[in-house]
C-alpha cells in the first residue's frame, strides 16, 4: 500500500499495480481476527496505480492488505 488517507467518504487507499493483474483489497479491525473482509470484488488494474475508497461511517482502527488474484 502506497498511501492511506482519511476522507469525507471513508478511507482512500492507493497502491502500485501491474496493469492487467487482478487485485483484492481486504481489511480487518483486529490483527487477532483470523478472517479478512473484502472491500470490493477483485479488480483488474488498468494503470500502474490503483485508487479505491473504503466507505466508513465511523473512523476506526483498521488493517488493510492487497492480494494478487490469479
Image (spheres, helix red, strand yellow):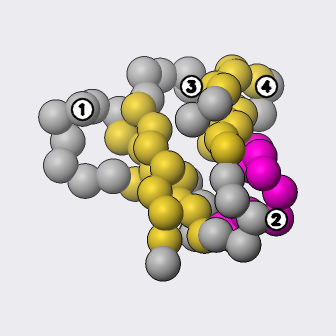
Residue mark closest to the camera, 3 vs 1: 1
Residue furthest to the bottom in view is 70
Which comes before the other along the chain, label 2 or label 1? 1
Mark 2 vs 3: CB contact within 8 A: no
- Counting other residues with Cα less than 10 Å from the Cα at mark 4, is it few (<14), some (14-19), or many (20 or more)? few
Helix, strand or loop under label 4: loop
Residue mark closest to the camera, 2 vs 3: 2
Residue highlighted by disc 3: 58
Residue 11 in sight here: no
Q: Which residues are magenta?
A: 43-51
Which comes before the other along the chain, label 3 or label 4? 4
Residue highlighted by disc 2: 46
In 3D space, how far apart are the residues under numbered discs 3 and 1 (Cα atoms)? 19 Å
Picture coordinates of residue 33 (x, y %)? Answer: 20, 42
Residue highlighted by disc 4: 8
Picture coordinates of residue 69 (x, y %)? Answer: 49, 71
Residue mark closest to the camera, 4 vs 2: 2
Residue at point 47% right, 22% down?
60
Which comes before the other along the chain, label 3 or label 1? 1
Residue mark closest to the camera, 1 vs 4: 1
Which comes before the other along the chain, label 1 or label 4? 4
Instruction: Identify the disc placed on residue 47.
Output: none
Q: Is residue 12 left or right of residue 58?
A: right
Residue at point 57% right, 35% down?
1
Mark 1 vs 4: CB contact within 8 A: no
Residue mark closest to the camera, 3 vs 4: 4
- Counting other residues with Cα less than 10 Å from the Cα at mark 3, is it few (<14), some (14-19), or many (20 or more)? few
In 3D space, how far apart are the residues under numbered discs 1 and 4 (Cα atoms)? 25 Å
Residue highlighted by disc 1: 31
Mark 4 vs 2: CB contact within 8 A: no
Residue mark closest to the camera, 2 vs 1: 2
**Position above or below: 7 against 16:** above
Amino acid at each position: 500500500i502506497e498511501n492511506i488517507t482519511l476522507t469525507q467518504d471513508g478511507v482512500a487507499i492507493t497502491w502500485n499495480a501491474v496493469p492487467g493483474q487482478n487485485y483484492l483489497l481486504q481489511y480487518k479491525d483486529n490483527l487477532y481476527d483470523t478472517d479478512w473482509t473484502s472491500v470490493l470484488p477483485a479488480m483488474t488494474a488498468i494503470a500502474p496505480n490503483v485508487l479505491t475508497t473504503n466507505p466508513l461511517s465511523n473512523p476506526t482502527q483498521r488493517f488493510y492488505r492487497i492480494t494478487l488474484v490469479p
